[in-house]
Structures are given as structure tokens and as C-alpha cells.
Amino acid sequence: MSGTLQSCVLAACALLLAASPAMATTLARMKLDELATAAQAIVYARCLETESRWEGGEIWTFTRFEVLEAMKGALPRLVTVRLLGGRVGHVLSTVEGVPRFQPDEETILFLERAPAGDFSVTSWAQGTFRIERNPHTGRQSVTQDSSAMAVFNPATRRFEHAGIRNLPLRAFKQRLAAILEQQGGRQP
């Protein structure tokens, strides 16, 4: 292959690679008050079941939750959360930052209505707070999923690890109640 032809082929490949879409997930850091504002509903819920299936050419996971406490918004006792990715047969689709749930797990979820009428988690991992019970004391604590992942902070223009970790559930609820009160009151 001549040098000119080789250069043309390399230039064409570079253009094709530059034109291909980026497949990365970048979430901007949201503070708890920003999450509370963005969410249409906030619930303390227990995961009942999860199912993944093909819809619109993508794999989606549908998780049913029993609402144990509505902290913001009026919701039915059972809600379905739809999130991109999951496993159908031998095909696995994963999306960085999308939470996955296990039956009987308790979480606090910041939710927004999806176009299909079910719900999605606001800012995915940032709007997911896992409840853990200390086996020795019985005390419950809250850990935000995004506290384990680097999230872009627009103020510093850097990726940072931050978020809520091992905060006593009672303290978390008090903090959230104060935010909701400041934003216009609780909406059970």
C-alpha cells in the first residue's frame, strides 16, 4: 500500500472513531436538598421482586417495592421502578450508576415518574440510599449508593467520592424532614 493511500485510510479510520458516540455515564454531584427538589416522591420502601425483560430494543429491570413510608408525594402501597439494564437469558446489560435491588432489601428512594407511568430513581445511584441494620445493636444506618463511586462536581470540575455513609437512619430522616419543610412542607 502506498504511503498516500495508507495515510488516507488512517485518516478515514480516525474520522470514523471520532464520530462514534461516547458510551460513558457521567453524573453531576447533587446535594441532598437538590435531590429532594428534583424528586417527585421520596419513599422508604422494601424490595419485593425484580424482573428484567426486553422492551424497545433494550433490557430494562422492573423492581416492585412496598412503600413503608412516603416522605414526599402521595403513592400507592406498591410501586414499580424501571431502570435500564439487567439480565435476560445469557444477555447482560449494565449501565454504570444504575442501582440494582434484592428482594427484602430496604431503601430510601428518590423517585420521578417515568413516561410509561412507573417510576425511575432520580439521578440513579445518587437517589438510592441503602438501609443496613447493625446485627449487634439493631440500629439502622443509611448509605448512599453514589458514596462508593466518583461523581463529577461541577463546582470543582473534578470527579470526587462523596455522599452519605453510615448515617443513623433517624438522623437521615430528620435531615430530610428539615429540607422538605424548608422546601414547602412534607407531602404524605
Image (cartoon, helix red, strand yellow):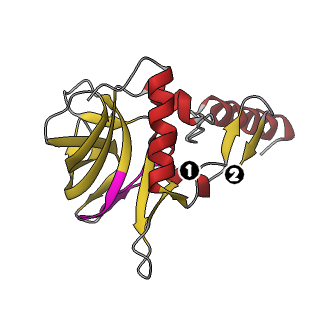
Q: Residue furthest left?
A: 77
Rendered image quadrant of residue 42:
top left
Residue 87 at x, y percent in the picture:
29, 59
* Residue at 83% across, 34% down: 4
The residue labelled by disc 2 is 161
Residue 121 tag number: none
Q: Front-most of 114 and 32?
A: 32
Q: Is residue 103 on the magenta stretch?
A: yes
> Residue at 62% of width from left, 34% of height from top?
28
In which quadrant is the C terminus drawn?
A: top left
The quadrant holding residue 165 is: bottom right
Secondary structure of residue under mark 2 = loop
- Tell me where residue 86 appears, x and y as whole percent: 32, 55
Residue at numbered disc 1: 146
User: Which residues make up the magenta segment?
Assistant: 91-107
| Residue 60 is one of the magenta-drawn residues | no
Q: Is residue 18 left or right of residue 82?
A: right
Left or right of residue 56, residue 22 in this image: right
Local packing at callout 1 (Cα closer than 10 Å; few below 14, some 14-19, many 20+) is many
The amino acid type, in three-letter code, at marker 1 is: Ser
Q: Main secondary structure of the magenta part?
A: loop
Image coordinates for residue 50, horizontal then vertical, percent:
21, 56
Residue 78 image offset from top left, x and y in percent: 14, 43
Tell me: 23 left or right of 38.
right
**Could you say which quadrant of the image residue 181 lies in?**
top left
- Does residue 88 appear anywhere in the picture? yes
Give yes or no for contact between labels 2 and 1 (Cβ–Cβ under 8 Å): no
In the image, 112 versus 97, the foreground residue is 112
Q: Earlier in the sequence, mark 2 or mark 1?
A: 1
